[in-house]
Image (cartoon, coloured by chain):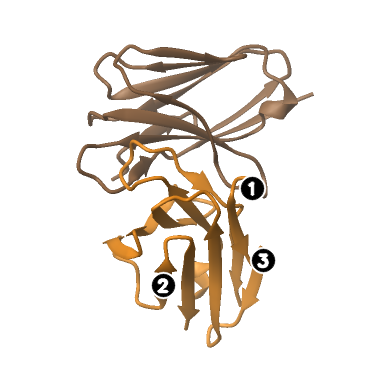
Amino acid sequence: ETGVTQTPRHLVMGMTNKKSLKCEQHLGHNAMYWYKQSAKKPLELMFVYNFKEQTENNSVPSRFSPECPNSSHLFLHLHTLQPEDSALYLCASSRDPGGNQPQHFGDGTRLSIL
Amino acid sequence: TQLLEQSPQFLSIQEGENLTVYCNSSSVFSSLQWYRQEPGEGPVLLVTVVTGGEVKKLKRLTFQFGDARKDSSLHITAAQPGDTGLYLCAGARGGANNLFFGTGTRLTVIP
């Protein structure tokens, strides 16, 4: 139990569907992150939120839309995805943003685009 | 261009053997973290090193931060099947909002 919960654990969707990934942290952290992990690529940072405000958007396509209603919850809204978007999507949190804090990861959502 | 390169990319060894994993960069980091990710799970922090030349031990795992704070190594003694997983280094740079993750080393320890 890492204190970071992601749902769903697995998701299969067509390219025209709209779905959302959810992340919740119970650690009282102020910063939350979305990462993409593909089989043949290193961990890619997508978005960073600090106190609900987005502080980093790592050139992510607009078909990925993050939402952070409060510092405990983070969503990733998906629409019109492409097959190359199939990957493991990981959420993480840290006490504060910036790399000097350890990050606590959820177990990820395995996304498959048909 | 990847900021942190890890080597080897894949490593398969017999139980009981020793191994070393490297994390290299041309950039200086204020600190460096090592994570292990097991199948079906997210990465879990193993250790953070902060001072150049620092050595930290975690049971059979020994972590070293380079003197110039540009590189790090992880040495495992007498590897066990439970050590199997993806090892990730991650560096922190002043002023950055996030960690920079390495390319990863996938370790398999065969019983």
The residue where tag 3 is placed is A10
Q: Tell me whether circle 3 and circle 1 mark residues in contact (CB < 8 Å).
A: no
Q: Badge 3: few (under 14), some or many (20 or more) residues near its Cα, within 10 Å?
A: some
| Amino acid marked by disc 3 | His
The amino acid type of the residue labelled 1 equals: Glu
Q: Residue at the spot x=52%, y=56% of the render?
A: A90
Residue A67: give its label: 2
What distance separates the C-alpha of mark 3 from that of mark 1?
12 Å
Q: Nearer the viewer, residue A102 or A12?
A: A102
Residue A41 visible in the snapshot? no
Which of A50 and A40 lies nearest the eye of the viewer?
A50
Left or right: where does residue A95 sit relative to residue A5? left
Q: Please tell me whether mark 1 sits on a helix, a strand or a loop.
A: loop
Which chain does tag 2 point to? Answer: A
Q: Earlier in the sequence, mark 3 or mark 2?
A: 3
Q: Nearer the viewer, residue B3 or B55?
A: B55
Q: Position of residue B15 (x, y in %)?
A: 73, 18
Q: Which mark is residue B5?
A: none
Residue lying at the far bottom of the rendered structure: A16
Horizontal and vertical percent for residue A20?
54, 76
State the quadrant of the C terminus of chain A: bottom right
Say which chain tag 3 marks. Answer: A
Foreground pick, B31 / B88: B31
Asked if A93 appears above or below A78 in the picture, the reply is: above
The colour assigned to chain A within the rendered structure: orange
Amino acid found under the numbered disc labelled 2: Glu
Tag nearer the camera, 2 or 1: 2
User: Which chain is represented by brown in the image?
Assistant: B
| Chain of the residue on which disc 1 is drawn | B
Image coordinates of residue B12 in percent, x first then y, are: 65, 27
Disc 3 versus disc 2: nearer the observer: 2
Label 3: state its secondary structure.
strand
